[in-house]
Amino acid sequence: MRLNDFTIDSGYGANNHLDNAYKYFLLTVNGLGESVIQRWEVYNMIADELLSLELYNKFEELKYRVTGKENPNSAIIDILDGIELTNLLHNLLGLVYGYLEEDKYSKFYI
């Protein structure tokens, strides 16, 4: 997975400080395992859908929260809770809930 496969420079101001922090964050994600990268592909699909719905403020909020070290699953669930979901977002949200459960169980089995 290359960095340019992710949605980054969209929203209110392209290539601002938040975008740069998000790029750096994604570069560190790329050094992790395949399962983490697969999750970020799902998160990126959610970001793309938010942008296609012109919910730029929600995309900016997502970037801000994950670069602030918040759990991406919790941030996405919270953000999507406040909007009307498309079919795609509804399906992707199910995957995010699954990731949250996986993380919960992995704490006990590691």
Image (tube, rainbow, N blue to C red):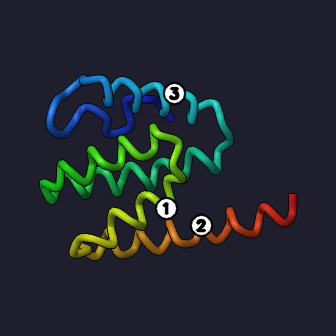
* Mark 3 vs 1, N-terminal side: 3
Real-space Cα distance between discs 2 and 1?
8 Å
The residue identified by callout 3 is 27
Amino acid type, label 3:
Leu
Using the numbered discs, state the Cα–Cα distance from disc 3 to disc 2 in whole angstroms: 22 Å
- Residue 21 in percent (x, y) is at 40, 27
Q: Earlier in the sequence, mark 2 or mark 1?
A: 1
Amino acid of disc 2: Leu
Reply above or below: 95 against 43.
below
SS label for mark 1: helix
Mark seen at residue 74: 1
What secondary structure is marked by label 2? helix
Q: Earlier in the sequence, mark 3 or mark 2?
A: 3
Between 1 and 52, the residue placed more toward the observer is 52
> Residue 82 location in percent, x, y?
27, 71
Q: Is residue 76 above or below residue 4?
A: below
Q: Quadrant of residue 88?
A: bottom left
Indicate the position of residue 91 as horizontal and vertical percent values: 39, 74
Tag 1: residue type?
Ser
Q: Nearer the viewer, mark 3 or mark 2?
A: 2
* Residue at image point 20% right, 50% down: 57
Label 2 belongs to which residue? 100
| Closer mark to the observer between disc 2 and disc 1 | 1
Residue nearer the viewer, 64 or 6? 64
Are the residues flagged by discs 2 and 1 in contact, CB closer than 8 Å? yes
